[in-house]
Image (cartoon, coloured by chain):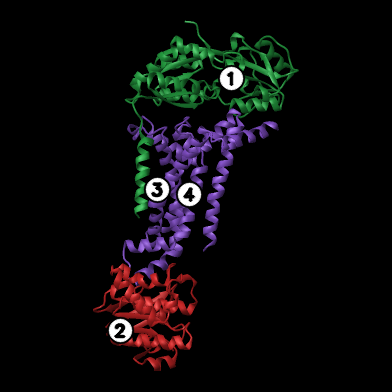
Chain colours: A red, B green, C purple
Amino acid sequence: MIEIKNLTKSFHGKRVLDIESLNITAKGITIIRGENGLGKTTLLNIIADIEGQYEGEVIKSGINSMDMTFVQQKPYLMNRSVFDNIAYPLKVRRWSKDLIDKRVEDLLTEFNIGHLAEKNAGRLSSGEGQKVAIARALSFRPKLLLLDEPTSNLDKESTILTEKVIKIYAKREEAGVVMISHDNEQIKRIGGRVIDLRVYLKGED
Amino acid sequence: MKKVLFILLVVLSLSVNVFAKGNKSIVLATTTSVRDSGLMDYLLPMFKEDTGYSVDMVAVGTGKALQMGEDGEADVLLVHAKASELKFMSEGHGVKRKELFHNYFVVVGPKNGVETSSVESALTKINSEGLNFASRGDNSGTNKKEMQLWGENNITPKGDWYIVAGSGMASTLRVADEMQAYTLSDIATYLNLKDTLDLEIKVGEDSSLLNQYSVITIAPSKNKFINEKGANVFMQWLASDRVEEKVGEFGRDRFGMSLFIPDQK
Amino acid sequence: MDYIVQGFSKALSLLTGFDRELYSIIFLSIFVSLTATLIVTLVFIPLGVGLGLKKIRGEKFFSRLLFSLMGVPSVVVGLLVALLISRRSVFGFLGLLYTPGAMIIAQTFLVIPLGMGLAYKLSKKQGRRIKNEGKLMGARGIDLLFLVLRELKGELLVISLTCFSRAITEVGAVMIVGGNIKGKTRVMTTTISMMNSMGDYAMGIALGIILLLITFIVNSFAYVFHQED
């Protein structure tokens, strides 16, 4: 469970987030919806612990930092092969080489990017890059997966594929997925809980 | 990672040599003109062979060499500024001082310039006719000698004709050449550059142009690193008959004359 | 004029004839400057990167300090080091003055602000993003530093090459702490300087050519790596 209490965040004096209370279950899929500029990305940044300047409380019970990850809108891909990128979270967790190889191969197949395995991740198209970033995020089987518009750069076919992968993942691993989307069709396809951020923001007219 | 460690190891082991300083080693402070003459490059290998001592020869200005002696940064000095040396000894910085060899400064000038026989007449003429004169102006031994000579003739050099060149005997000679001026030079540097200069010796072995070279051993009371033994070995070796003869031979094959004349015992 | 031409031709024959003294001077120059650069590259550049990833108190002051130290004249560094290692000084007992070791020390001090300052600046600009992503992937502590170092490898190499250039072309520091002793502490820059004051152009020109070649090669590498980003 992710509990948010009295969260406020300002950028250069301008108030960008003001939430009195918001709870998000850390199991199953939750989609955060809302127009541009409401602060969805900022909220996810805070939950993911990459934004540390804020007031209020964000309590993630039962989840420690090594169990969760976040795929940003513009994810940073390392200057190495796609394979090595996806393998990295496993390397830092000191998985054995055999297990790493197997897991990465599985993910490459799942996302249909096997042909990109040896390609330098810096040379991918934005769509390919996005898939790699998501595959990488799933590599260590996080208990909580945060995604910021994960299919924004993907064509229809890849979008459907990715949505399927995420759905299967959440179910099979009994993991929590918190995702930002403003594609209503997508929201319908994925299912899960929908949070309209606007409802939770104070002082919005 | 392993490669990095290996390189570090290599560097470290090389650096042992790089940092080491044995006790069969002395620091000799001397002047740039001594270094430039090539005399030490000629003698030091012989010294090493004969005595096993290696010499770290640091060539600096006369003033600095004496200062290094005073500060105990050198074990032995080879300099040629008698007045300053005597003061140095009277202040107790050195233990032994020995005059070993000498040569003469020369006044050089343009080939169809003045014809004189003495320093006195040369300088007087240069001053009265406002002939170009290049001075080192760097407080070196040569420069000090120059100022001493002007003083002895009661002249204070001033005016457009008195050119204060950069330090370094060679560059001063080039300036003199360029401006077809007179200048005071040590014999070795002049001879080395003679073929590229349009200057000739005007006054040679005048007694006032005497350039006396001496060795001074530094007082061990300065600090505990003074290698008194090594300094004495150096002085004795340099003063020995055999080596003095070698000193006299230096330069003969190239210039047909000794660059350094051993002092009579 | 013909002494210049003479100088060039003698220089060429020294170079192609593998004159022993000439090549030992070249070797020493590279050894001293390369060692100093390696020390800075392996210790102080990563340190600069690491500091750039943290939020430190007095960041602005630190930045400004490093940048002003970058411009310290090499003679001043040489003087300071010489004062510390001369016989009557604190570290006199090490007997370091007039050794290649002292030259390495002086040049290291000279380029530390350069390497560390540029690495710090680079890290502040590009490092944070990499660090964040690293954290999200589960990297912690030293893994994070290595990740950033590896990702910024190209730019860091350029910084390292810059340090090497600065070291090998300086003359003030090595002159003062090394003493320009023949066969022991003579490097290209001090020899060129000495040859000039002696009026011997041949050796000076030969070394000048080599020094130019080295700096040209090093800077070309830096240029190539820079372009790759």
Give the chain letter at badge 4. Answer: C
- Residue A101 appears anywhere in the view: yes
Q: CA distance from mark 2 to mark 3?
A: 48 Å
Q: Quadrant of the C terminus of chain A?
A: bottom left
Q: Residues within 10 Å of mark 3 (few under 14, many from 20)?
A: some
Sequence-wise first label, 3 or 4? 3
Residues at marks 1 and 2, CA–CA distance in whole angstroms = 90 Å
The residue identified by callout 1 is B188
Q: Residue C83: image x %, image y %?
A: 41, 34
Cα separation, mark 4 vs mark 1, equals 40 Å
Judged from this view, the residue extending furthest toward the top is B265
Q: Give the answer, above or below, for where B20 lies relative to C210.
A: above
> Which residue lies at the image location 39% right of the left edge and 87% below the top edge?
A163
Which label sits on residue C39?
3
Q: Residues within 10 Å of mark 2 (few under 14, many from 20)?
A: many
Secondary structure beneath label 2: strand
Give the amino acid at mark 4: Cys
Give the residue number, with chain letter if any, for mark 2: A176
Establish whether labels 1 and 2 are both on one chain: no
SS at mark 4? Answer: helix
Under mark 3, the amino acid is: Ile
Query: For the point 37% across and 20% down, which residue is it?
Result: B230
For the residue marked with disc 1, what is the amino acid?
Ala
Secondary structure beneath label 3 = helix
Question: B94 or C218: which is nearer to us?
Answer: C218
Q: Position of residue B108 (x, y in %)?
A: 67, 18
**Cα gap from disc 3 to disc 4, whole angstroms:** 11 Å
In the image, residue A79 sits, relative to residue C222, either above or below, namely: below
Residue identifier under label 4: C163
User: Could you tell me which chain the residue with mark 3 belongs to?
Assistant: C
